[in-house]
Amino acid sequence: MSTVTQSAPSRRPRDFAFSWADAGPFLALAALLVIGFLVNPDFLSVTNLSNVITRSAFIAIIAVGATFVISSGGLDLSVGSMAAFITGITILFMNAMAPSWGAWAIPAGMVVALMTGLACGLANGVIVTVGKIEPFIATLGTMGIFRALITYMSDGGTIPIDRTLREAYRPVYFGTVGGIPIPILVSLAVAAIASFILYKTKYGRKCAAAGANEDVARYSGISIVRTRTIAYVVQGACVAIAAICYVPRLGAATPTTGVLWELQVITAVVIGGTALRGGKGHIWGTVAGAVILELIANLMVLSDFVSEYLVAAVQGVIIIIAMLIQRFSK
Amino acid sequence: MSTVTQSAPSRRPRDFAFSWADAGPFLALAALLVIGFLVNPDFLSVTNLSNVITRSAFIAIIAVGATFVISSGGLDLSVGSMAAFITGITILFMNAMAPSWGAWAIPAGMVVALMTGLACGLANGVIVTVGKIEPFIATLGTMGIFRALITYMSDGGTIPIDRTLREAYRPVYFGTVGGIPIPILVSLAVAAIASFILYKTKYGRKCAAAGANEDVARYSGISIVRTRTIAYVVQGACVAIAAICYVPRLGAATPTTGVLWELQVITAVVIGGTALRGGKGHIWGTVAGAVILELIANLMVLSDFVSEYLVAAVQGVIIIIAMLIQRFSK
Amino acid sequence: MVPRDANATSKAASGACLLRTRGLSKQYGPVTVLSNVSIEIEAGEIHAIIGENGAGKSTLMRLISGYVDPSAGSLEIEGHAVSFATPHEAQDAGIVLVHQEILLADGLTVAENLFLGRELTRNGVVDDRRMQQIAADKLAELGCHVSPNRLVRDVALADRQLVQIARALLDDYKLVIFDEPTAVLTGNEVERLLDIVLRLKERNIGVLYISHRLDEVQRLADKVTVLRDGKMVGTYPGRTLSQMDMAELMVGRELSALYPPKSDAKPGEPMLRVMNATVPGYVEDVSFTAHKGEILGLAGMVGAGRTELFEGLVGLRPASARIELNGVPLHIRSQREAIDAGIGYLTEDRKAKGLLLQERLAPNLTLSALGRFHPGLYLRKRRETAALAEAVAQYDIRLKSLKVTAGQLSGGNQQKLLLAKILLTDPSVVIIDEPTRGIDIANKAQIYTFIRKLVGQGKACIVISSEMQELIGLCDRILIMRQGRINGEVSGEQMTETNIALFATADTEGGQAAVGGRA
Amino acid sequence: DKKTVAVSIPAADHGWTAGVVYHAQAAAKEINAAFPDVEVIVKTSPSATAQVSALEDLSAGRKLDALVILPQTSEELTMPVKAVKDSGAFITVVDRGLNDPAIQDLYVAGDNIAVGKNTAKFLVEKLGGKGNLVVLRGIPTVIDDERIKGFQDGIAGSDLKILDIQYANWNSDEAFKLMQDYLAKYPQIDAVWANDDDMLLGVLEAVKESGRTDIKFALGGNGMKDIVKKVIDGDAMTPVETPYPPSMIKTAIYMTVANLVGHAPVRGTVKLDAPLITQANAAEFYFPDSPF
Ligand SMILES: Nc1ncnc2c1ncn2[C@@H]1O[C@H](COP(=O)(O)OP(=O)(O)OP(=O)(O)O)[C@@H](O)[C@H]1O
Ligand SMILES: Nc1ncnc2c1ncn2[C@@H]1O[C@H](COP(=O)(O)OP(=O)(O)OP(=O)(O)O)[C@@H](O)[C@H]1O
Ligand SMILES: [Mg+2]
Ligand SMILES: [Mg+2]
């Protein structure tokens, strides 16, 4: 080729608004849908897909928060046990209020959940930023703490939600609006707001800058402490929202609620195209990542090839392949 | 001060072998021992300390390998399930050989363990470096794979070692040489060799360079792929050594062997002073980190303050405090 | 002859000048890197700071702009005492620093970097379109045409420097500090930048300007402050100083000629022969030969693809080429193989690709040549220390303590360390990308002599440089690249700035035409 | 038309659940071979959440005629199982009851309280109502809770004293460590109870290695074959065992299928006993081929 115009070395092909880095997870998702269909045509049935996507909503919502944390250069391993803890607090609160407030205990409980989430996120953020502790270790610590608190609150057993509230609360998970399940709507709303914040506000820029290069960010007048702490608080809020949707599905908080969610969440974020070392976050990629994970699990149930013992192995292989698709589609 | 001699900049005071960055974990360790003694004087009894340190040997040995991986800019989440997998393979092999080879099956099994470890490490390394997949995800994938394989091999149950080999093998965990338990000696030997490699050889330098700045390493003629892959192979060898010492402890491999070791291993490395984002590794700090973790767990049992439900919380708090001591002792 | 100190004659020091430093000092542990520096900058004045590598220029600038706290001394702006806890506070007070080293976030776009920390918003929403527009305009003013939504990671070093400069010009500051802004720029952009600096002056903005290119200083400076070994030598009225005066004030002794005499001997047999080199996206079908005992120069504008060509040849990026060394064909797939074959390449990006900034000096020095210090089972640290001592002496690396990390060396001294690092591998073909970037004039002469000595020993040396003067003074022959091709070649009498500029900018008939060069 | 029986059980993450998986798969294989018009599908789930998902997946894909479920937790699975029931399936619940007993058509259960209580009673009797105990419990779940509760009820009124009780996550390794620490902490321990046999293995190893002689009994629960073997062999430290046979899943599957093919309509509750396994009756509880 030699059609380059004279004396303007900058006039190389312009950047596309669409980037392949963003497309990666969606390609992986598409590949998975095709494979799924080949394995079992039911896979693409509306009921099945709707179920799967509804389920992926929790991880998606939490992972949207994790996108902030990871983008800003942090990491949060405590999200799973934080979810359990928030669920526990919320149910205890609702149950205590149900006799006097009736169904009003539900919205009040939601507020409590949100406050708890914000507080937990703040705690994580402060330990990481002010305490200057490696996020991996700091949040591993708080993971133990939240997990212990829910175990303590439940005396090692379960905290079920009050029967009187059950039916009133059910629609939050099982209801639909315009045919679309509410958790899907909630997660879309969360993702939309999050991508607005991350891409369209000053804070979003600060976040990406703090994760991309701390020094540069600091010299540009960005407070790393504040930016990263806020990211953890956003994470806390997202966990709370997920917990709110989660309560009616399982109707109880137990010490095993949310175990290993942190791994799924981080996997979703990374499959979605956000680098673990920080920098630009990809909210919609993250959402696609969460759906991919849930689809893989679903595929394992719908297919009959795999010995029960080997499910985890096949899942591992598929995740690695999904990452390869994501990587090489760039 | 200005007593520096002119024009001979090389004749400055020599570097100390000892640095405060290295001292951090040992300070935390000392603090823990003092607290432990105050809580329960039995804490410092020879039996207790010897038990605890012996127990910490597995994590220490694996964490020494993890120091290579992390130093070179990688991460390995699969070590726990890799340990279980190697243990399983080794026992199956020994059991198969026991009838014909007698006690010779044990050393042969050790060789098999080592080969398996090297192979597993190589697999991890190749996926991460050649496949260019984020180490977190790649090894999360292989973690699932190894775990599934051991579950499959054991049908979900246990793979016990042949009765005839048990007694012959027992001393590898329970024996002592000169009064010192063998696992402690093994872990010291592993750490000594590892620190020789990391601090005194070409490879060690390459490792730290690859972790500190990939581009600089590449421009200096260092192959990132090779360096990092070797680090994973070293990790595999360390896991195999740990597995070899582990087998006689309970005499069986189960699907729960090594669950969550990866978190302990990474925590030990980080408490030991190695940064999770790569660069210089601190082998002896890592060993101290592993002992600290085991001591904390031990202290939880020996003290009477904490409700069983809250043990994890207190552990989390102590780990965070240990990190703070480590950080601010610098 | 050296003129008298200008401050002695200047008007009463009580006038509210734009910025005044009083007895600024900086110590790192036991070492003093700057002591008792007092300077004054008026509004609408261009004040140059010159000094040898490691003299403390950058340190002084960091003190003034809030990046580093002074150990002693104070700052005054327009007569009011100030102190800055962060660079941002300094910026609020109207002082901005363009760093010697590039400080941008790699993973963000050009426009995002430009506006980092002060994004334009409309109704609380960042106004990307407007920012990109302004960014493009500002960059175009500087002669930089990269797309504002390109990632900084993907743009050339010179463009990054321009982005950094544009950042400082975005707001109205009272004092703009340039720390070696032209080190990575080529002719055209330098001219544009000097223009802009003069325009700042017209707008009554104060400028502090650091450069090792004394011609620039001479053209711009109203006043020149000379630092030597952390201390002030004096402040002088700019126009009264010749370049030679400045050099002598910096060094404190008389200087010999800058460039070593060129060798009269005929260049030897071909040593490195490159045929049909293509680096996808950057370089197309380039062939050339470097001869034994020859210094071969490579000229071209930013973006001509010189760096990429050689990075491709030594295996650092995907490329295809037939390479022969001393007649033997080579297949180089990695930098290691290049080093082993005897081809050393010194990168232009010392900070990101050259040195491990957190590491001590010895490990940095030996990183490419570890084999030499590893005769048996283990690394001989003593030999490394000895090699460092030798390098420090040979390349005149100025440091206050051998215990510093590479990142704590001054910019020019980092460059010398990098040169020492690459030569430790004992290459027979040495490729140096921007050999004297950020190096003071006295040391430049030293490095030129050194390069001449290298080829005298029968090596071949390829010098990529954006300073035409340097190429002309140093090289035996110069290739000029343009848009990924070799557009011309000059040697002997034909090596003039006009000729080089011609080949660098204009398309020539039939691609390569040799102006008076050898056949 | 083929009838579909879905079996939803926890994934094999420790010995007992591995036994469940083993028996469920064995039953599925036998039935699929024996009854051409019945298809048994076994699906395992690693957590309650995953199990809820699996139920949705199973019932979204095909029409279920029956569901045999061993719920990870009661609360979390109650509603999802009800949803399957509403689609017309026959529901068999195994081991852990749902919150709403009305949902199940058939309930096959072990008796966790009895596991704790019977063990406790044995200790009270053998130790003469006096002594120091240490207890290892598993993962904070209902089963764990019930066993501990049963045990505490069992020793109530005697002078047996529980010195310490800690979680060891049903993991033999953690039990080994915990037991070592108990031994370091308490100079006199008369008996140890680990509420699951996996953990007992670790306990025995720690006791053996310490060389301590004060420990008279180390008991477990669940009927692991290695421990039953010890009982058969007349081990002094572990002379008894309580069964909590994972084979209950097999029983449940067979009963469900029988119901479906109409041979024997079964409804109601089948409560498996947790009698003390002693040397006398141990042979009945010994399955050397099971992984558990
Ligand atoms: N953080 C630090 N710790 C110790 N010494 C330092 C540190 N930063 C700078 N120095 C030393 O201070 C001295 C002055 O450095 P400075 O960067 O100011 O020089 P400079 O005049 O800008 O040189 P150049 O022309 O090479 O850029 C050097 O000897 C350098 O090694
Ligand atoms: N990743 C990339 N994608 C597209 N274009 C790029 C990328 N990286 C660099 N470029 C462009 O390639 C061209 C060549 O780069 P570069 O400026 O390094 O060449 P050079 O001749 O070595 O210049 P100099 O050494 O003077 O800086 C530039 O126009 C640069 O903007
Ligand atoms: Mg400088
Ligand atoms: Mg270049």
Image: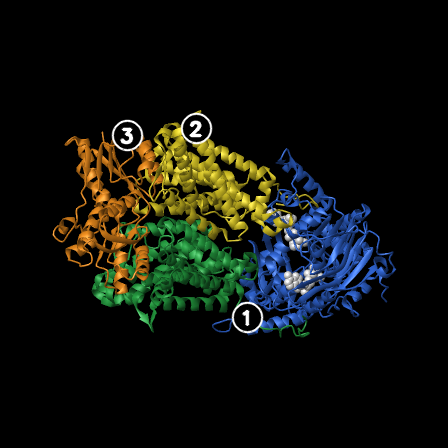
Chain colours: A yellow, B green, C blue, D orange
Q: In what element is the residue under mark 2?
A: helix
Dot 3 corresponds to which residue?
Answer: D85
Could one spot residue C333 in this view of the protein?
no
The three-letter code of the residue at mark 2 reads Trp
How far apart, in angstroms, are the residues tagged by discs 2 and 3?
A: 30 Å
How far apart, in angstroms, are the residues tagged by discs 1 and 2?
A: 67 Å
How far apart, in angstroms, are the residues tagged by discs 3 and 1?
A: 73 Å
Dot 2 corresponds to which residue?
Answer: A104
Foreground: C294 or D52? D52
Relative to B124, say whether A231 is above or below: above
* Label 3 packing within 10 angstroms: few (<14), some (14-19), many (20+): some
Q: Nearer the viewer, mark 1 or mark 2?
A: 2
Q: Position of residue B172 (x, y in %)?
A: 31, 66
Q: Split into 4 quadrants, where in the image is the N terminus of chain D?
A: top left
Residue at 19% from the left image edge and 45% from the top image edge: D274
Q: In what element is the residue under mark 1?
A: loop
Relative to A188, say whether D21 is above or below: below
* Label 1 packing within 10 angstroms: few (<14), some (14-19), many (20+): few
Q: Chain of mark 1?
A: B
The three-letter code of the residue at mark 3 reads Lys
Q: In the image, which disc is placed on residue B16? A: 1
Q: In what element is the residue under mark 3?
A: helix
Instruction: Residue lying at the far left in this picture: please name it.
Output: D280
Foreground: B278 or D35? B278
The three-letter code of the residue at mark 1 reads Phe
